[in-house]
Image (cartoon, rainbow, N blue to C red):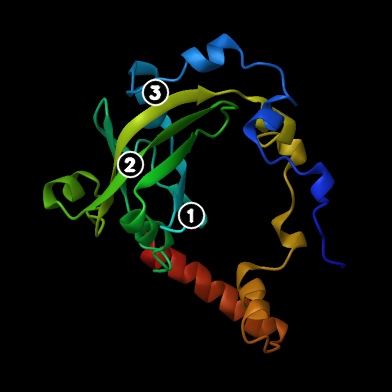
Amino acid sequence: MAGYSLNKDHEVTTEAALRDLFPPTHDLATKKVQQKLDKHAQDFITRAPFVCLGTQDAKGKADVSPRGDPIGFVKILDEHTLAIPDRPGNNRLDSLTNILSNPSVGLLFIIPGFDDTMRVNGRASLTRDPDLLEQLSVHERAPRLAIVVKVDTVFIHCAKAFRRSKLWDPEHFQDRNTVPSLMKIVLDLTDGAPVDSAEQDQLDEALEAEYQATLY
C-alpha cells in the first residue's frame, strides 16, 4: 500500500476556516455544558460500567485507555470530583505516566444499550489514599491506586455516532472467530515465530486463564 501524502491545498489550518465549513453551533449545545456533576450526570455515571480515559503526555502525545468494572465503579466523591480505580493491567502505565506530566483528561462514559454518552473533562491526580482505595474494592481486593478527577466540564453527548455505527444492534455484531485471536496478533507483531494450531490453542487458553486470575 502506497503511503498517503496530505494535499496541502485542501488542508484546514485555522479555526476560522474550520468554522466556515459548518453551520453555527445550536444554542442548546452550548448551554448544556456544565461545570459540575448535576443529578443527571451523577445518575449516568453510576449506571456506567465502562469509560474511555483520554490523556496526553507533556509533549501532547495522546492516548485513550478503556476502563471497565461493575456498574457504578467510578465513585462520585462530590459534585466536582470523581475517582476511578486502577485495576491490574499490562503495566505499561501509559495513562498514569501521562497524568503525572499533564493532568488534563477527557472521559467518555458508556452504558450498554444507551446511544447517548456522558463526556467529562477535568484535571487528574493519582492517589494511594487507603480509605479511598478501600471504597473502590471489588471482591475484597483494593486497587493499588486511584485516579481522582476534578471536573472542569461535563455534558451529555448525542446519540448520532452510536446510531450510525449500530453498535448495540445484534444484527450488526461481527463474529470474533473470523479474525485472529489476540495472542496470534501479538505473536505476529513480536517474534513472529510460527506455532501450530495446538500450540496456539494452548496460548489462547493460557491468556484466558490469566484473565480469570488477574482481573482484580
Residue 92: where, in percent of width, then height? 42, 68
Going 61% across and 75% down the picture, which residue do you hit?
186
- Local secondary structure at mark 1: loop
Circle 2 SS class? strand
| Residue contact between numbered discs 3 and 1, judged by CB atoms under 8 Å | no
Counting from the top left corner in percent of width and height, residue 114 is at 56, 27
Work out whether 89 lies above or below 207: above
Residue flagged by tag 2: what amino acid is it? Arg
Q: Earlier in the sequence, mark 3 or mark 1?
A: 3
At x 33%, y 41%, the residue is 123
Q: Position of residue 189 (x, y in %)?
A: 65, 77
**Sequence-wise first label, 3 or 2:** 3
Q: Amino acid at mark 1?
A: Gly
Q: How many marks?
A: 3
The label shown at residue 60 is: 1
**Residue 213's disc number:** none
Observer able to see residue 87: no
Say if 75 sits above or below 65 in the image.
above
Q: Provide the residue designation for mark 3.
A: 41
Q: Which amino acid, by three-letter code, is at mark 3? A: Ala
Q: Residue at x 67, y 31 (%)?
A: 161
Tell me the quarter of the picture where residue 194 sits: bottom right
Q: Which residue is mark 2?
A: 123
How far, Cα to Cα, is label 3 from label 2? 17 Å
